[in-house]
Amino acid sequence: MARVLHLLPWLLMVTVMTSGQGRYKHIKGLRSQCLGNIMRVTLDKSLAIGNRLEVDVLNGSSYMAVSPAMASQCGYSMHSDPWGNTRLYSTAMACHVENRDDEVFSGGLRLRLYGEQGTDEDAHEVSKTCRYDQWADREIICQRNFMEVSVNRLPPPIEEGKDVMMGAKTGDDQLTGAGQEPVTSASNIWRMVFFTPKEKSMSLSDAQRAGYGVGTSPTRLFFRTPYNNSETYSENVAGVQMRVVKVTTYFKDMWSVTMLDTAAACPTGGTQFSEQSITWFLPRHIYPLLAGHSSDTLEVYMGIAAERLSDQEMSSRGYIMAVTDSHITVQLPVGGPDGFYKSHAPGYEYHITYSIEPMLEVLWREEDQLTRYKVLYPITTPAMPRPPHLWDDTVAEERIFDLTLGTFLHDVQLVNLTFTTGVMNIEEANSRGFNVQEHRFPNASKTFTLQVPFDDPVVAKSHFDRDSTTYTLPLTFGFMILPELTPFSHSVVLDASLQDVVFPVVTGTCDDEAYYVTVAYGSQGNKLKTVVGKRELTSELAKEYGVRDNATHMTMRVPFLSPDSVFTFVIPFAAGGRLDMKLLEPTNLWSLNDFSLGCTFPMPLTECHANGTMTALALKVESVPDLVLEQLTLRDTSCRPLFTNDRFASFAFPVNSCGTTRRFVNGMVVYENEISVAGGNQKQIIPLAQKKSGKKAQPPYRLTISCYYEDYDFKMLAFVPSARQFSRTPIHGMGEMKMQMKLATDASYSSFYMAEDFPVVEYLKQPLYFEVELIGSEDPELVVFLENCWATLGRDRLSTPRWDLIVDGCPNNDDSYTTTVLPPAAGLQNPSHVKRFEMIMFAFMQNDTVVKDQIFVHCDAAICDNNRQTSGLCYRDCSSYPGPMRGPTRPDGKSKGQSGVQLPSWSKKQQLSSGWISMSR
């Protein structure tokens, strides 16, 4: 992974565990160290994360704030890990460091810590004096945000006794005169030439404005640059990518010009990673810094955060350093004690990185020049996926999901939980009865636990077998990584099965007319599929049976004669019935309860009438499923049922017909007949009542019916039946015939507008096609007649204004666009049941203005009996009809007069209206 080159801000978030009132007091966890040519100030994690830190540097007697740009130009660096451990570095040559003869260095910082609201400042001064006098001819420091090089700027001392040209001075006064500053002082810097590798010249002030730090100490010239300034460049050195800067500084004093070369090269690559270790390579010979092709390595030290480690310390921490001909190699274990882990969420998934800041310090000689090279190299591994692990500690019998999710680093915060019902924050989840907890461990990792009851609506319930319930908890954890506020999530699904199904319980009773059933739902609740007889209990059927239900119970009333019950036996004055119900699991259709309720209902099957007729009712019992009731007859096989369906056959006949016999018993006259199957080929019938009594099966179906009359009340009348069989006499009853009016989409009458299509939009003078049809009747002797049709502005058929379309069965002759009554169409099953007419789209006008751009069409229609009509409307010939007597409606709504034609002797009249039709302009 490439080295991080950007400068961390100098506003850093830390938390102070003390809140004293004094502005400058000692704070535990704050210490300073001298580490060679670097001073380090450390704030450890006792000042844990949370508050804001601002850093000032002591400049004489006052403080000035350190900004990121100033830090890289002046030799300051700062870094904080997620725990709140913060390190601040300054070099011996840093700005505002007091320098005494390049041997004693004193610097001061002020740390200002603010509360979360930006108040409650807690300030602490840190000062340190360090001694460093082991200067090499050239010293290079590679920090995370800058490169620094310093060189000896004074010429070497001249041996005693030798003369100096053009000055004849010796010792410290050579070239300068006694007590004067050497030519190579900052005030004498004339030009600076950068090699990129092309030459680029600029003045000292231009270089400083460009972010370079340039200056002199008593004996040295120092130069400092951020990594990415435009005059730096990249170079591959022995397979390691490095950032290089080379500059020559020209000093001018009157007639003399002096040049000093400075160069620095710092690594930006050279790392290899595995899951267990980090390998860092540094070229042993950094050629951009050498005049030749080799150098002699004198000393090599390895350290952490600018602090050297002994061999014993390196060994105990698992660090390995090796020096080869080409490289200095350092191997670091991932997870070592001097680094730290950090959470990340690339691709919205949880990853971690490990970061550490090793140091290499090398001293080499090239010819007679010594170079001390110190590089502090922050390394961060590539993001390593760490999908959270789920521990499911659920005990199904406790009816609660119990799970643990982890592990996470300390910088991960659980924000919310997403269920199928919605999102909850942690406070909402706990207040709902979920138990959400965070658990921290000594190694700074953490886990989260969650408990959710099985009975909560966020838990789905399903059934994979008849006796068990499977509880499913789909859940998404929403996390946030601090302090970046990076979101990520992790989804889990938990299942638990429990044999806890409580089956529904069904009970029932009967009265003389119906079955009464009560269902206690059990653990399935009302989400059951109910079958009554052989039909599913739909909403329509539930309404028919008066179903009432709630979350736990259902009741219904099923009439005895309902087609969903069956007849089990018959006796002269009663019938046995049974109602079967099945309760099924809706998904897999497992049977949860099969229920049968058997009852005996009073039901006389034979009635004897005083006028000498008998009526009898034959029932189809469950034990004879193949019985065809239409095949039943009386003894006279020409006497067939007057009515049959799939459950009943009814007979009605005079007692002296259909093979009825008569006998006298104890003052009673007994008339008897038999109901049997025509042809005698019906299967044997074994009624349920006989099965239970153990009786043997009967011969083929015979049902004896009898009527008893007291002989002194019975008067025999002469009766000669005509050839017309009584069994064919029609039974009078009540019925209903319906008509409907529809608007066709075109003249073919093949498709019609539906209710949701209205209002229908049409242009003026365009035809509209209407159809009036008798529905629900197959009688070809019935004829539909259009009596009157008219149009109104309002939905009310009696509203005004009104315009007549058809009057007394004929088109309105006063209409300039006469309505056309169309002949019956070919191909209809009953053409007389249909009447069609065509009208032209118009609009009502008043004072030459359209009153409204929509109309409603109404009709009065009649149903005529073709056999009973001798004249009149159903057969009116409009060609000779003088025309209607009713004129158009005036704007004031008053009619010009009206007359009508009487309906035929038998007819049924209905009123029809069509949805409104809008005019298209």
Image: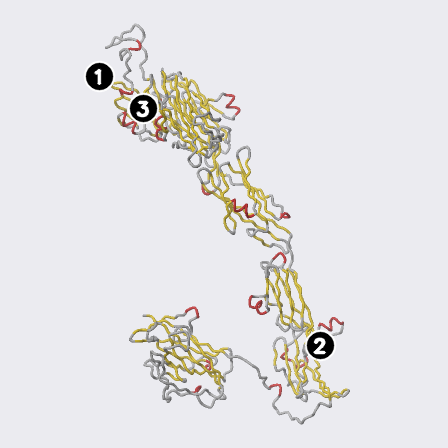
Q: Kindly identify which residue carries mark 3.
A: 214
Q: Is residue 430 left or right of residue 189?
A: right
Q: Amino acid at mark 2?
A: Ile
Q: Is residue 338 left or right of residue 507?
A: left
Mark 3: which secondary structure? Answer: strand
Give the x, y percent position of residue 204: 27, 25
Q: Amino acid at mark 3?
A: Val
Give the x, y percent position of residue 283: 41, 25
The crowding category of the residue bearing disc 2, from other C-alpha atoms within 10 Å (few below 14, some 14 to 19, many at least 20), is few
Residue that appears at 61% across and 53% down: 469
Please name whichever residue, 33 or 1, is drawn nearer the observer in this view of the structure: 33
The answer to whether 56 is drawn above or below residue 593 in the figure is above
Q: How many marks?
A: 3
Disc 3 and disc 1: Cα gap in Å?
23 Å
Mark 1: which secondary structure? Answer: loop
Q: Is residue 389 visible?
A: no
Q: Earlier in the sequence, mark 3 or mark 1?
A: 3
Q: Quadrant of the N terminus?
A: top left
Disc 3 and disc 2: Cα gap in Å?
124 Å
Residue 255's tag is 1
Q: Kindly identify which residue carries mark 2.
A: 571
Disc 2 and disc 1: Cα gap in Å?
146 Å
Label 3 or label 1, whichever lies nearer to me, is 3
The answer to whether 358 is drawn above or below residue 349 in the figure is above
Furthest toward the bottom, the residue is 718
Furthest toward the top, the residue is 161
